[in-house]
Image: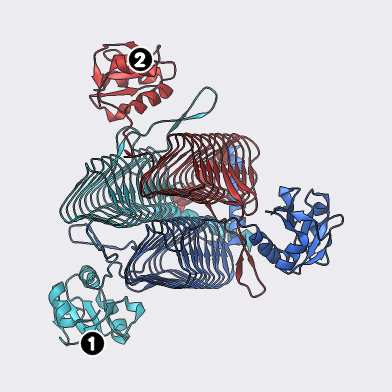
Chain colours: A cyan, B red, C blue
Amino acid sequence: MRLTLADLAARCDLELAGTAAAAITGVCGLSDDLPDCISFIINRDQVAAAARSRIPAFVTRPDALIPGKHNLLHQHPEIAICRVAAMFAPVAYTPSTLLAANASIAASAQLGADVIVGPGVVIGERVVIGARTRLLPGSIVLDDVRIGADCLLYPRVVVREQCQLGDRVIIQPGAVIGGDGFGFVTDAAGNPIKVPQVGRVIIGDDVELGANSTIDRARFTDTVIGRGTKIDNLVIVAHNVRIGENCLIAAQCGIAGSSRLGDRVRLGGQVGVIGHVAIGDDVVVLAQSLVTKDLAQPGTYAGTPAMPARAWRAAVARFRRAGRSRGC
Amino acid sequence: MRLTLADLAARCDLELAGTAAAAITGVCGLSDDLPDCISFIINRDQVAAAARSRIPAFVTRPDALIPGKHNLLHQHPEIAICRVAAMFAPVAYTPSTLLAANASIAASAQLGADVIVGPGVVIGERVVIGARTRLLPGSIVLDDVRIGADCLLYPRVVVREQCQLGDRVIIQPGAVIGGDGFGFVTDAAGNPIKVPQVGRVIIGDDVELGANSTIDRARFTDTVIGRGTKIDNLVIVAHNVRIGENCLIAAQCGIAGSSRLGDRVRLGGQVGVIGHVAIGDDVVVLAQSLVTKDLAQPGTYAGTPAMPARAWRAAVARFRRAGRSRGC
Amino acid sequence: MRLTLADLAARCDLELAGTAAAAITGVCGLSDDLPDCISFIINRDQVAAAARSRIPAFVTRPDALIPGKHNLLHQHPEIAICRVAAMFAPVAYTPSTLLAANASIAASAQLGADVIVGPGVVIGERVVIGARTRLLPGSIVLDDVRIGADCLLYPRVVVREQCQLGDRVIIQPGAVIGGDGFGFVTDAAGNPIKVPQVGRVIIGDDVELGANSTIDRARFTDTVIGRGTKIDNLVIVAHNVRIGENCLIAAQCGIAGSSRLGDRVRLGGQVGVIGHVAIGDDVVVLAQSLVTKDLAQPGTYAGTPAMPARAWRAAVARFRRAGRSRGC
């Protein structure tokens, strides 16, 4: 694909300070340093490095012009570059028809306008799917599920019975929504007895869920993922968890049963949250930490168990000194 | 769904101390406080909170009657509520026929009475499946697998060649049984050479396996999961591991090659067990710990590496004090 | 299956010092001690234990003959046993035709000689697949993917658009290649905005990828897995990561965005690597550690955050003593 800068500026609402007829074939990061691409910088500190690169064109702020380059101006280059990159997004899958011949769609399912159903997809009884939602090949949606409009389910997603997704939800391949929560009681003989998990998963608008992540259905009521929250790959959200809006949950986090997260919570990779704790708005937890108690105050936490990050760094420094003095 | 208390008491073997004609529409936890549901309490400490709630009916012990509520009596309310909840379990998938038209079932496969095979399911040569077992859409069972009676495989489960499952096994969506173990030797040039993984996975009766978990086949012999053991989501059980009976393995645990777990072992979330260690009966390991040595004695362990939990808590307290004195 | 030792010696290039007509039915480890199998030992220290076992035949070095057993001689028994084991490898799936009738193969896809495509497989537009590559049931390959020759994709693998695999690549069930990287910018209102992930995943020759692992596509350019690298189950490799050759990455590792690994790097299970760090050639990181800074020097590292393993062990010893003195 090849776009002129004039075309790109028009389509992405950028002001061009460069040659209209110059063309690029892709987008790259500054360190990728590719000669036919456009890149971006977000502040004036990067101007010199951008000028030294082989990259011919940049999205940049009006107060950070790059000498010798084609400049495309925007007040927020990190947001504008998203629109630019979208111009170069590859097609994922080209359906030959809206509804694939070998999909299995229950007669009672209701599909909105322009819904795409790929080969091998299974849609259960009484499922409702909103307009323009795309189910790529191999996804399976069991009975009584509701999926909103403009969603994108990549291949091999499972949505189990009764679960609900809002609008514009994106689910990466292999994710599982609505698996049984992990709940057992012990009988008199010491055998674990399964507690039926009869609740649902409710996912808000604009949520994204990563590859092979799993969101368990509630024991009796609802597991809830709030509007705008983004969850990375291989995460488990256990039964009855409630996550607020616009959270960012990095890969391999595990949030145990009945815990609550507020809005704009950020969890680094491999963070664990034990069951029945509450994490307040705007809390940040660093990678591989374990939250064992309520974290009510906004701030950054770290460690196993999690503590304020500044105290953790001091404790780690002392731990490391102990190692150096005796081990080396 | 709507059930009268008389009906519920009869079906779930409960003694009713309340209005027979009163009806409920679901089940909830005490903290969910829903006005049309039944809930449960397990001891007298919860009587006052139950009485204050909006919930109209409770399963409770005969010595813990809740004033102003419909009481359904049982010596073990936490077990009785499982039968109650099962009354409200939603249907997962309604098959239009026992064997879906677009399933691929090898001619040499033997299916017991009333086996259900969903759309897109693939069953390999010489597979044997017991009576009433259900394979929901998209599950794939390779050659020479044996699956017992009354099992439930949710969508998109994979069972690779030669593996064996007992009776009443439940596999959540996306789990993989029998992937190759991670075994390599290094040749003279430093390249890793694959050790063929020619063993099997043997899963006992009444085992449950969580969404997207993976149980690797043995190098030469068998990886074994004992009867009654329950494994949560995103767990890896590596090649040649042997797990005893009635263990509870929480989400994202990793058990490395050839390790042994006794009976009734409980691992918290994100626990690691390195290869070739033995964990005895009734050992409990707290979340995010790493077991690096044999743990022969029953008890609770924690930390990386794991140590008795009481010692770990004391060591953590000292670590935290170091942080506070210098970091805050 | 039953093989005479003469037959086995001839097929596996071993020198037989034993009875040519003796037969075995499988392969086992020394501790498995099975009476009809062949096993192996790698040095003279194991001769006595082998002699005491019930195992009738061993692959061993010419300088480590086992008295009373059939000896099959090779300078590198740990490599020779791989060939022996391969003789006993079970068939995974018996296709009734090369291309299953209910696979969905785009008209523009190009399949090499003797490619096997199982039931339920979906192959998108312009996909190119090399000779003898096998796609087992339920795998899904989106538009413009290139897969080399002699690859083996087990059931339910997903390869998203534009990604490329070399020759002899093995992908265990449920793995996802090319899911979107986890990239968001925040708009003025505090909402996360998705950064389109328009890059690819490039996987070299002889790579193996474990069950339910996920390799994310790059933001703009390429995520790269080098030749010969082996990745275990439930691993995430994030966008723009570059991994060198012949690395061994154990289960549940997480490598965050844009990090770089050299050649022959070994990561234990559950290791985390934060974003934008560089790990040099021949670095070993022990299980459950977190790499937070560049590790340029070859050597063994451990801890959260990772430090030289010797210093970590000393620091842990001190931490444990603190626990013992106060906790027990």
- The quarter holding residue A20 reads bottom left
Amino acid type, mark 2:
Ala
In the drawing, what numbered circle is on residue B233?
Answer: none
Which residue appears at 71% of the width and 48% of the height? C32
In the drawing, what numbered circle is on residue B10?
Answer: 2
Percent across and percent down for residue A219 are 35, 34
Q: Is residue B70 visible?
A: no
Which residue appears at 60% of the width and 38% of the height? B244
Q: Residues within 10 Å of mark 2 (few under 14, many from 20)?
A: few
- Which chain is mark 2 on? B
C201 relative to A28 in the view: left or right: right
Q: Do the numbered discs 1 and 2 sit on residues whose CB atoms are within 8 Å?
A: no
Secondary structure of the residue carrying tag 2 is helix
Secondary structure of the residue carrying tag 1 is loop
**Vertical arrangement, residue A120 with respect to residue A32, above or below:** above
Give how far apart the Cα atoms at labels 1 and 2 are: 83 Å
Decide which of B54, C51 is in the foreground and name it. C51
B74 relative to A144 in the view: left or right: right
Percent across and percent down for residue B27 are 30, 27
- Which chain is mark 1 on? A
Percent across and percent down for residue B3 are 27, 21
Which residue appears at 39% of the width and 66% of the height? C257
Amino acid type, mark 1:
Pro
- Residue lying at the far front of the rendered structure: B107
C54 relative to A3 in the view: left or right: right
Which residue appears at 34% of the width and 67% of the height? C161
- The quarter holding residue C307 reads bottom right
Decide which of C312, B288 is in the foreground and name it. B288
**Vertical arrangement, residue A284 with respect to residue C197, above or below:** above
In the drawing, what numbered circle is on residue A67?
Answer: 1
Using the rendered image, report if marks 1 and 2 lie on a common chain. no
**Vertical arrangement, residue B54 with respect to residue A67, above or below:** above
